[in-house]
Amino acid sequence: MSDFQIENKRADTLQTDAGKTNSIEQVRYVCSLGAMHSASAIPGVIPITHCGPGCADKQYMNLSFYNGFQGGGYGGGSVVPSTNSSEKEVIFGGAERLTELIDSTIKILDADLFVVVTGCISDLVGDDVESVVSDFQKKGVPIVVAETGGFRGNNFTGHELITKAIIDQYVGEYDGPKEKGMVNVWSLLPYHNTFWRGDLTEIKRILKGIGLKVNILFGHESEGVSEWKTIPKAQFNLVLSPWLGLQTAEHLKNKYDQPFLHVPIIPIGGMETSAFLRNVVNFAGLDVDKAEVFIQAEEKTYYNYLGDFSDFYAEYWWGLPAKFAIISDSAYNIALTKFLVNQLGLVPGKQIVTENPPEQYREAIRKLYQNIAEDVSTDVEFEEDSYTIHEKIRSTDYGHKPPIIFGTTWERDLAKEFKTSIVEVGFPASYEVVISRSYIGYRGALTLLEKIYTTTVSASA
Amino acid sequence: MSYKIAVASSDGKVVNQHFGKATQFLIFEVEGDYFKFMEILEANAFCNNGEHDENKLLSAVDALEGSRAVLVSQIGKGAVQALKTKGIDVFDVHNFIEDALKELIEYYFDIDAIISCK
Amino acid sequence: MKINLDTPVVENREQRLGTIIAWDNGKASNLLKESSSICSGCGANNGERLCETKGPFTQGSVCSEMMVECQAGNIRDAVLIQHSPIGCGAGQVIYNSIYRNGLAMRKLPVQNIRMISTNLQESDMVFGGIAKLEQSVRDAWNRHRPKAIFIGTSCATGIIGDDVDSAAAKLEEELNIPVIPLHCEGFKSKHWSTGFDAVQHGLLRQIVRKNPKKQKDLVNVINLWGTDVFTPMLAELGLRVNFVVDMATVDELAQMSEAAATVGFCHTLSSYLAAGLEQEFGVPEIKSPQPYGFDGTDAWLRELARVTHTEEKAEVYIAKEHKRVAPRLEELKKLLKGKKGYVATGSSYAHGLISVLRELGVEVNGSLVFHHDPIYDSQDPIADKPDSSKNSLEFMVNDSGDVPNFSVSNRQQYQFYGLLKRVNPDFILVRHNGLAPLASRMGIPAAPLGDEHHALGYQGILNLGETILDILAHKKFHLDLAAHTKLPYKQWWLDQKDPFVLAKK
């Protein structure tokens, strides 16, 4: 146990030795249908949901509104058509209703592509949605279907179901030549990763900088479906995340014979970003000299600003965080850990990954933490239930002062208990307004530093 | 607990009649998860493609009083409202009668089990 | 119609009250006339029925389960179990933020919301999820020692047929606290207000004290998270407030049967509970207009005073308040002269807000409600015409005037465009999400009333006026956006004069 006092621990929250159960209190991810946001994240694409009356709104309000107040964009939020399934669809099936909805949708909504996603009801009742949608496909309507089903996994797995559906049913077959220097990027989970819009912008910027033509695919920097159509032409795929996107990359390897580069740690800061870019340059066989010009220029800017910041970091009077605890999805978790340890020299306190990554990826993720720096090795736990997470955080020994917490809205009270600062970095971030902010790459790292230290400093008086 | 379901059908095989144009309703009695045909209820078609005689509508609805649900292929909004005030469920479907009945009965069976438990 | 508490499953709104979610037949008085036809056979309207339009195109609505989260999930010393796959659990994020803010506004200790999802997976769909439900209920007990545990069902558990009631009964015996099943599958009702009824049904059955000791000065106030405008107001009558359901404790909910009267901020929300308390426990429901605008608030206070025998104090307060707000009201009327407002909220609440706008001299030539209940609970549809003392639509039409271009639309954004174009308001009043973003992109600002009590009572008239002035200035933002944004609707649709045209084909 730590040396410092954890005060005002809620009298009504008790230690429990129940061990891991099915209960999830204070959710860290949502259902597979929630991945409808991955569709609306592509410019010009509108999802159509075949589900109960509350699903679409609920998924929007939690993933997008009360998580950075991100907004629904062109085709999200309350724009999304939904069958609002009723008793009739439960008893007699909903295929007819879905047909009628799609029919009227194409009259009313203007989209380049519609993506039908299904919820619990239709998957339980056994609606043949594929058949309904293929009838429209045969008529030339730009539409695909992904049977996400609420209970079939979570919005991470749903995301890859949707990307696969678009690739197989819309992008289709391709036998032609590859375009050297073109890359498809598979990275953060739109909307769930609160800063995805700014982050993807930065990723595209730096990859472009080293000479690549970038299919960023999601977000405002994407050209939309026309970009998706060029996926098969890309020289390679870049999976820039601990595990999300690997299935997609494997599928593209089989389908279009495309190699992929897997970089599990999204780079934050000068060192990491430069290393990342050099890795990509090497893999893709790009012009090294040209790329170096870009990298050097970026580093110059970065270190100028870091130098300015270093006055503060070296001699701020009132003490700075020394240890950290991170409670977030794996992508941000490992990226932050790497940055905090290597750039700032902070000491890992506790890391908990919350999106329930599939079992087969966990060992590799653990190794990343074990090798976080030459002289720093740490561990990671996988836990999705916030009650259990908070117990673990409380029972960790941090030494003489509390760690700074990188977490979510669920951790706000925990931070008060610890009398420490909290930076909300992931779902849900209900007390952040996020527009184009990024926390990664060269530029994002500086924004992140601003956020961390403004938070600690402004708490003083 | 037994109840009745009325089906608008001209041929006894498929749910194929519009409520307002139905010439007959097949009345089925349901007990548990088992149903049997009871009788045919002759009906006077009252719908004139969007217009209808209100009195005839009401008497059609009255004639079905006591049924828990009615299955039709199509129905106008006025009729839906009228049936609802009598506590009669309405479903517009295009199935074979046997299939539709099975599905609906299974559903009612589950609900009744829950409602009757306290 | 008598409320039936003998079954654990609440009858949904459309069954009890003939609720409709889409209607577009002209003036508010038309809706009123057609509603009277809900009494079958009374021929009050030459048989012109209340018809609900039904079209092929719908956008996502809201479901009953969400309202269960909204109420049962917000009780301070209880836990709500969401018996569902993780998707329904997403609501925890929304309601946590609202709950925390609500607690802060009410000056109660801020804490995270306590809802547990049973996190059902594919295998549970096949083999049932009761074991997981029992585990989660026990976890709730072990973790928080709550005074009560609510269980909300979901579309999935409704379809697979989990016997939640038996599990609840068993656990209630085991843990010796109320374990209350709330049947709220999304597909069971076309309007989400059934979710309020489901919670209130459970409260009446299992929480409300069955042998109450009457407290003559206690008044139940059915609300959500609004600021506390009721305590000072009722104190003028020598009365105390028992806020329910959100942010109350289980004990405060139990004592509902001990109160001298029940009021609410919106008949739509409180209809079932208030009627149930009167029917089962003799707690008089204040059947009067809602407390919005002068006439509404006067009538409401007078009826409350009559029932609690505090008439003299009420008259003093009424006179005092009329005098107090008059000067600023005159100023606000001058500043708002010529302005047109459009209300788009839940049913009774909208009726109230329209009255307040008219007190401010704002023109209301169009509005929409998300649904319409032709009658309320505690009325017999076979006997007399709807009890107009509780009929907020009737009061609005008779007292503050008819509303041309009145519509019923369950938050369908695609219809909102045409509806706004009909009347071109200067601003809209909303509470629920989804419509204001469209209005924004049309250059029309919105006043979102997160604090549902903001426009209530005499002070509420002033509050609303001030807020409208604040947001009218926002027009600059919205006009700029409107000039640079493209709506996702096809031009063909935007050109349609009738937003309900698809239903009529």
Image: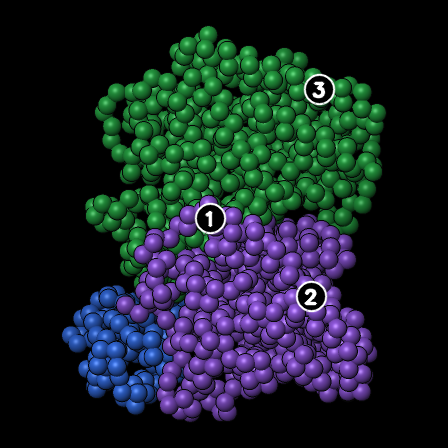
Q: Which class describes the residues within 10 Å of circle 1: few (<14), some (14-19), or many (20+)?
A: few
Residue A424 visible from this viewpoint: yes
Q: Which mark is residue C483?
A: 1
Chain under label 3? A
Q: Which tint is chain C?
A: purple
Q: Answer yes or no: are tags 2 and 1 on the same subunit.
A: yes
Q: Secondary structure at mark 2?
A: helix
C-alpha separation, residue under disc 2 versus residue under disc 1:
31 Å
The answer to whether residue B8 is left or right of residue A282 is left
Residue bearing mark 3:
A308
Rendered residue at 41%/42% (across/down): A39
**Sequence-first tag of 2 and 1:** 2
> Image quarter for residue C417?
bottom left
Q: Amino acid at mark 1?
A: Ala
Q: Secondary structure at mark 1?
A: loop
Residue C442 in the image, given as x and y percentages of width and height: 47, 55
Rendered residue at 75%/33% (across/down): A456
